[in-house]
Image (cartoon, rainbow, N blue to C red):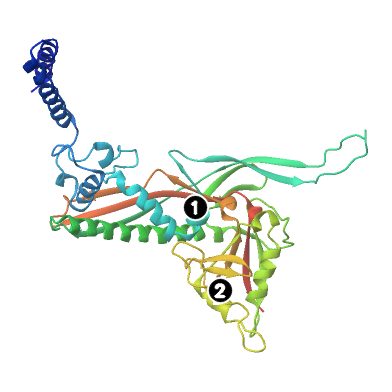
């Protein structure tokens, strides 16, 4: 049946509807039903799905995961829309994995990469640049009525351009997978979770220790900053809550005694150097080794100075120290490593204001079921950048030997 058949039925319908014959009038409703049925059949044939019009979004997801596990050629033309199945090939390489994974990947990385979950994240298609402002000197003043104004505050404007790093992970698995849908779903989920975990761990290391440089223009004496929060140039002299030197991480030093408590007081000292504008949303970041040392400090009666919080909800804060929430990031150094390398053991910041992470496009996935018989290779790539944009919103604690 086609459009011509429908038109003929419409003509017959009109003729019978205008007839005085009761039988003809009774047939009108039958013709209406036939027309409606024909329209439904044509609609089903015009749909992009090749098997049935009743394939739901859940079916699309299953087919997409099948493609992820077995490779592109496991899917017949029309089973999944092109926009759902693959992205256009960019200059940096192709992408053959469905976009239905994007949301899961983003949520997974936010949970597994502590600095990402705390910071401001921007997604761009090209390099990111932004204007930065630094106060060179001066402060607001008062004046008498009708007295002259005096220039008292001088601001300096420069430009910050993010550098990039590409994080990659590749896995290889046997190509045989059961056609059972549940098996395919389970394997796809396992592969995805494993690769997200690997990339998140590398991301955490880059955001803390990465030496990739960001370009700085029009700031006297400064041409670059580094991606890693712990790889910044430290400023240890005269740090107060008003310290704000772009390109230098304000750092408080705490002396580690041969025995006795020191960390709890050091955290309080660190807190005192962060401006009150940032304290409300400030979060401590340190390793589980530092957490253990903090909660093992005791008073003269053997009672813990700090009490561990109840177990946290996944993706939430681990607890509080002096009413400040903290998260554990095991890419942060242990106490022994911090003493040996001179890197900060604790960070305190309003990370959403202090640090901006840039995602250059989405996660890139490639499935290769061809180059190595009996195996399917899964490759994932993610291009990221990171930079401190407000040095007044972050403070670091460095441990030094007595």
Quadrant hosting residue 314: bottom left
Point 61% across, 62% down: residue: 348
Query: Could you say whether the residue bearing mark 1 is in a helix, strand or loop?
Result: loop
Query: Could you say whether the residue bearing mark 2 is in a helix, strand or loop?
Result: helix
Q: Position of residue 12 (x, y in %)?
A: 9, 13
Label count reads 2
Residues 151 and 226: in front is 151
**Residue on which disc 1 sits:** 212
Q: Looking at the rendered structure, which numbered label has been put on residue 340?
A: 2
Residues 203 and 123: in front is 123
Q: Position of residue 359 (x, y in %)?
A: 44, 46
Q: Is residue 160 above or below residue 286?
A: above
> Is residue 189 visible in this depiction of the protein?
yes
Quadrant hosting residue 298: bottom right
In this rendering, would 65 be left or right of 274? left
Query: Is the residue marked by circle 2 packed among few (<14), some (14-19), or many (20+) residues within 10 Å?
Result: few
Q: Earlier in the sequence, mark 2 or mark 1?
A: 1
């Amino acid at each position: 049946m086609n459009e011509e058949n429908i038109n003929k039925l419409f003509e017959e319908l009109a003729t019978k509807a205008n007839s005085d014959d009761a039988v003809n009038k009774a047939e009108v409703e039958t013709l209406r039903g036939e027309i409606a049925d024909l329209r439904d059949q044509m609609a089903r044939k015009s749909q992009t799905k090749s098997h049935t019009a009743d394939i739901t979004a859940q079916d699309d997801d299953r087919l997409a995961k099948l493609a992820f596990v077995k490779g592109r050629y496991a899917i017949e033309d029309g089973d999944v829309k092109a926009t759902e199945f693959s992205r256009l090939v960019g200059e940096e390489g192709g992408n053959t994995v469905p976009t239905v994974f994007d949301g899961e990947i983003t949520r997974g990385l936010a949970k597994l990469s502590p600095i990402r979950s705390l910071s401001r994240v921007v997604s761009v298609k090209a390099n990111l640049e932004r204007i930065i402002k630094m106060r060179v000197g001066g402060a607001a003043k008062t004046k008498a009525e009708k007295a002259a104004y005096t220039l008292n505050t001088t601001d300096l404007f420069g430009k910050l351009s993010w550098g990039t790093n590409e994080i990659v992970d590749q896995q290889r698995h046997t190509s045989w997978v059961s056609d059972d849908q549940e098996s395919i779903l389970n394997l796809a989920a396992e592969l995805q979770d494993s690769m997200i975990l690997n990339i998140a761990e590398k991301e955490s290391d880059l955001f803390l220790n990465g030496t990739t440089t960001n370009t700085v223009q029009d700031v006297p004496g400064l041409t670059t900053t580094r991606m890693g929060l712990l790889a910044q140039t430290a400023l240890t002299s005269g740090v107060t809550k008003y310290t704000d030197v772009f390109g230098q991480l304000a750092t408080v030093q705490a002396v580690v005694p041969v025995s006795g408590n020191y960390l709890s007081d050091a955290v309080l000292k660190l807190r005192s150097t962060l401006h009150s504008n940032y304290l409300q949303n400030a979060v401590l970041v340190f390793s589980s080794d530092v957490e253990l040392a903090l909660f093992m400090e005791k008073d003269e009666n053997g009672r813990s100075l700090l009490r561990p919080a109840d177990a946290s909800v996944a993706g939430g804060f681990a607890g509080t120290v002096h009413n400040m929430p903290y998260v554990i990031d095991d890419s942060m150094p242990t106490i022994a490593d911090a003493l040996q390398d001179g890197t900060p053991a604790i960070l305190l910041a309003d990370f959403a204001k202090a640090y901006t992470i840039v995602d250059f496009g989405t996660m890139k996935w490639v499935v290769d079921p061809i180059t190595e018989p009996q195996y399917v290779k899964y490759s994932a790539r993610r291009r990221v950048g990171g930079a401190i944009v407000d040095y007044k919103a972050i403070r670091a604690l460095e441990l030094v030997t007595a």
